[in-house]
Amino acid sequence: MIEIEVGKRLGSFSFSAELKVRPGEIMVVMGESGAGKSTLLDLVSGAKTPDQGFVRLNGRTLYSREEGVNIRTYQRNIGYVTQKSNLFPHLNVRDNILIGAGKDYDRGYYEHLVSILNIGDHLDKKVCQLSGGQQKRVSIARTFITDPEIILMDEPFSSLDNILRECLRGSIKKLIKEKDIMGILVTHDLDEGYEMADKALIVRDGHIVERRRGKDLFERPEEDYTKIFIRNLNFNSVADDLKAG
């Protein structure tokens, strides 16, 4: 389980959050641009240091101001999937996947990742020979092969077409459930949030406005701000579909 209770001031912007995510769960984080969604991921990963509070992952303290603990990002055993694939152009697909795995990586799990992400025919190709969707699949495989305890996802599918988005959402969700690890997904996409969420929350101006289990946040929001936010996302989704049609 990851336990997060943090506060951070960035100039005039103040952020605070308190939440827990259990093994096998995906927490979806939504909100307007600038609300603090990516700040949450940065405070968990160690890219930013909280001013107060703590972050604990499976009983291990990653950050605690009171205890004087601040584990470095690369020592936290956290996977991160972002909008950009961030692959090494001079390496082929196989080497890109395995670059952080170490010599004793699980070869059976490597083959499973290659299969479920459908990249077996591309292992000897260089990055420049891959489509954007194929590059994203490789970056996901590279993230999971390191056996992280939690996956942080910051708009990971935003640059992909709808069909590929749906496919990769299903793949990541399956991999998280299989490994019984945790996921935190930041997204602006209502369909994506609805499909992926075991828990969901809305952030506004650096603070959590509402949090619910499962699909309840999307189907039965309680706070007025959440109702308006969800309604606007629904409207934008319909408008996008009409444009695409």
Image (cartoon, rainbow, N blue to C red):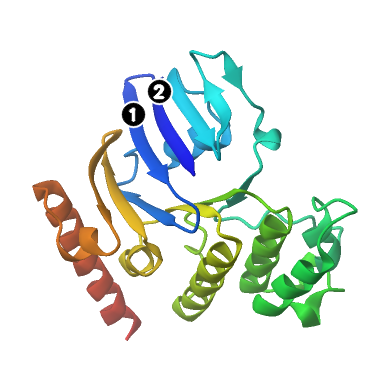
* Residue drawn at (48%, 13%) of the image: 66
Neighbourhood count class around disc 2 (C-alpha, 10 Å): few under 14, some 14–19, many 20 upward: many
Q: Nearer the viewer, residue 80 or 34?
A: 80
Considering depth in this image, is 47 or 22 the residue closer to the camera? 22
Q: Give above or below for 6 relative to 202.
A: above
Q: How many marks?
A: 2
Alpha carbon separation for disc pair 2 and 1: 6 Å
Task: Tell me what residue is drawn at x 50 percent, y 74 percent.
Answer: 170
Q: Which residue is mark 1?
A: 16
Quadrant, the C terminus: bottom left
Q: In the rendering, at what x and y percent does residue 36 appear? A: 36, 37
Q: Amino acid at mark 1?
A: Ser
Q: Furthest residue to the front?
A: 59
Residue 198, by quadrant, is bottom left
Callout 2 touching callout 1 (CB < 8 Å) = yes
Q: Is residue 15 above or below residue 230?
A: above
User: Residue 125 shows which numbered tag?
Assistant: none
Instruction: Answer with mark 2 or mark 1, whichever residue precedes in sequence.
Output: 2
104 with respect to 218 (left or right): right
Badge 1 element: strand
Callout 2 secondary element: strand
Residue 157 placement (x, y as % from top left): 50, 64
* Type of amino acid at the residue the image marks with label 2: Lys
The answer, for residue 165, to whether it is visible in the render is: yes
Q: Position of residue 55 (x, y in %)?
A: 49, 30
Q: Position of residue 57 (x, y in %)?
A: 55, 38
Image point (37%, 61%), residue name: 197
Farthest residue to the left: give it. Answer: 224
Instruction: Tell me which corner region of the image, top left, top right, bottom left or bottom right, holds residue 199.
Output: bottom left
Q: Which residue is mark 2?
A: 8
